[in-house]
Image (cartoon, rainbow, N blue to C red):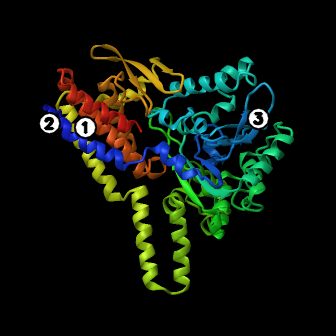
């Protein structure tokens, strides 16, 4: 409902300020969750399947390694991180496409997730055009001496692009444990001394084999293939599953799982990754051929998956979102073994509260859906956004409109508006900036929240993250309604809105 009085603007500002103070910004939460002053972290990144090319058949996804205290000396050399740096991701692909056939590349952690160095500048919307802009920025800033050929600079088959803004293309899970600086030094010495030359082989030297090699150098035998369920190969999901089992058997690893949801936008939604038998068991497109040509083997495949191959990354992330949740699980097992019924009930209650706070309950998500429907109806009735055309704004970002990145990587777009072309921020740091068109910002926040609320769990933000998006939507709504009030020359109202904007940026 449009705001028509200064007092209502002030009341809404106070309400939003309380929300902003109560909600950690996603980037800050992520950095704090992964960082440690006395120790380092290592983690397996499990990327969902892009459901393109061979992945449509295998559904295997991709895997990489997160290292909190190892940073790029270059895209092909490692070093210890300096104070303030947030670590890196190291991975291999079939063909990185660079001037030399490197086996692996390493990129800054937030470059891998969002395409930018600072998580405050992460995109709030994803499109192929936006990803192209971020990839080109990365190439110019990091790859100029490694990517000079025409094919490397322009071909979409050059897979160095997969390491820039991966969350625009797919959701992912990060299975994190504690390491030591000495372990990091050993890895750096080993990898910097060995030749970095590509020998990728889908059967025996794929991305999962590479991840297994890196993680097992930290923790011998911590990860292993599931040759039965993956028909002799190593799959990303098998590596994540075995590593989870190892971490839960060793409480000192301080295990936790983070879920990074795919950025809402026009890029095709990623799908849950699967092992070999799971794909045969669950895939409708493969079920009929199996029934026709391999009906004798189908019961064996089904039994193998159901008895030995099941692993749900989303449920694991909900169960172990923090070190404290993992420690509670260990204490719960001890209490059950000691038959301490009172402690068992207490710990179950603590677990339920932490799970609900992180992932949200079904009732809580449904309440947000109802509130959003009311906001959307009101916007349509008031003529602010007739016909709910905000759902089309994602498509407009891929229709040749101007998208650019500033020196920090924060994104801007120029789109047609009611009074001609208007400029709107596309990043968390600038969507509510004074120079970002309030109407277009409102459309974007409506579209983003709409997509999140309609997404299944595996491609939806955590509740903690969504509350930040909801606060931005409420501010954008208030700003849209209060625009005429602020424009009337009331400096206190303008200051109130600006302070709320600054709080929500972080």
**Disc 1 and disc 2: Cα gap in Å?**
24 Å
Callout in the foreground (3, 1): 3
Callout in the foreground (2, 3): 2
Residue of label 1 = 376
Q: What element carries label 2?
A: helix
**Disc 3 and disc 1: Cα gap in Å?**
49 Å
Q: What element carries label 1?
A: helix
Within the image, what quadrant is residue 76 found in? Answer: top right
Judge the density around disc 1: few (<14), some (14-19), many (≥20) Cα neighbours within 10 Å: many
Q: Where is residue 205 in the image (x, y as percent from the top left)?
A: 79, 46
Q: Position of residue 426 (x, y in %)?
A: 43, 28
Could you tell me which quadrant the C terminus lies in?
top left
Residue of label 3 = 76
Confirm or deny contact between disc 2 and disc 3 (CB under 8 A). Answer: no
Judge the density around disc 3: few (<14), some (14-19), many (≥20) Cα neighbours within 10 Å: some
Counting residues from the start of the chain, the first of labels 1 and 2 encountered is 2
Confirm or deny contact between disc 3 and disc 1 (CB under 8 A). Answer: no
Instruction: Give me the disc on residue 7.
Output: 2
């Amino acid at each position: 409902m449009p705001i028509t009085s200064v007092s209502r603007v002030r009341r809404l500002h106070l309400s939003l300020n309380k929300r902003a103070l109560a909600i950690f910004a996603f980037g800050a939460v992520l950095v704090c969750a992964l960082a440690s002053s006395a120790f380092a972290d290592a983690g397996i990144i499990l990327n969902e399947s892009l459901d393109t090319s061979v992945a449509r058949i295998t559904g295997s996804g991709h895997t990489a390694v997160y290292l909190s205290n190892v940073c790029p000396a270059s895209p092909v050399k490692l070093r210890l991180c300096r104070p303030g740096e947030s670590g890196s991701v190291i991975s291999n692909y079939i063909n990185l496409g660079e001037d030399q056939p490197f086996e692996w590349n390493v990129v800054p952690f937030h470059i891998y997730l969002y395409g930018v160095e600072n998580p405050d500048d992460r995109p709030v919307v994803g499109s192929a055009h936006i990803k192209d802009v971020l990839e080109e920025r990365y190439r110019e800033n990091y790859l100029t001496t490694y990517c000079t050929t025409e094919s490397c600079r322009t071909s979409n088959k050059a897979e160095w692009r997969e390491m820039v803004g991966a969350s625009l293309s797919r959701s992912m899970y990060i299975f994190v444990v504690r390491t030591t600086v000495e372990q990091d030094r050993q890895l750096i010495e080993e990898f910097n001394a060995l030749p970095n030359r590509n020998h990728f082989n889908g059967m025996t030297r794929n991305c999962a084999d590479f991840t297994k090699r890196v993680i097992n150098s930290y923790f011998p035998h911590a990860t292993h293939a599931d040759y039965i369920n993956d028909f002799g190969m190593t799959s990303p999901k098998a590596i994540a599953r075995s590593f989870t089992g190892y971490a839960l058997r060793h409480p000192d690893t301080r295990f936790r799982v983070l879920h990074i949801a795919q950025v809402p936008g026009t890029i095709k939604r990623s799908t849950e990754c699967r092992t070999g038998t799971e794909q045969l068991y669950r895939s409708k497109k493969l079920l009929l051929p199996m029934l026709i040509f391999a009906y004798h083997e189908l019961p064996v495949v089904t039994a193998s998956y159901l008895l030995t191959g099941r692993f749900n990354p989303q449920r694991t992330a909900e169960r172990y979102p923090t070190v404290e949740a993992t420690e509670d699980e260990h204490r719960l097992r001890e209490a059950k073994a000691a038959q301490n019924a009172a402690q068992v009930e207490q710990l179950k209650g603590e677990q339920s509260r932490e799970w609900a706070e992180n992932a949200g309950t079904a009732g809580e998500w449904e309440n947000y859906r109802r509130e959003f429907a009311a906001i959307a109806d009101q916007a349509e009735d008031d003529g602010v956004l007739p016909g709910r055309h905000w759902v089309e704004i994602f498509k407009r970002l891929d229709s040749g409109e101007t998208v650019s990145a500033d020196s920090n990587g924060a994104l801007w777009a120029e789109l047609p508006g009611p009074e001609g072309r208007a400029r709107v921020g596309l990043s968390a740091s600038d969507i509510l900036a004074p120079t970002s068109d309030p109407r277009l910002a409102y459309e974007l926040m409506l579209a983003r929240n709409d997509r999140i609320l309609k997404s299944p769990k595996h491609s939806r933000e955590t509740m903690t993250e969504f509350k930040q998006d909801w606060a931005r939507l409420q501010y954008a709504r208030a700003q849209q309604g209060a625009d005429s009030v602020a424009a009337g020359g009331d400096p206190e109202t303008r200051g109130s809105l600006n302070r709320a904007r600054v709080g929500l940026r972080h």
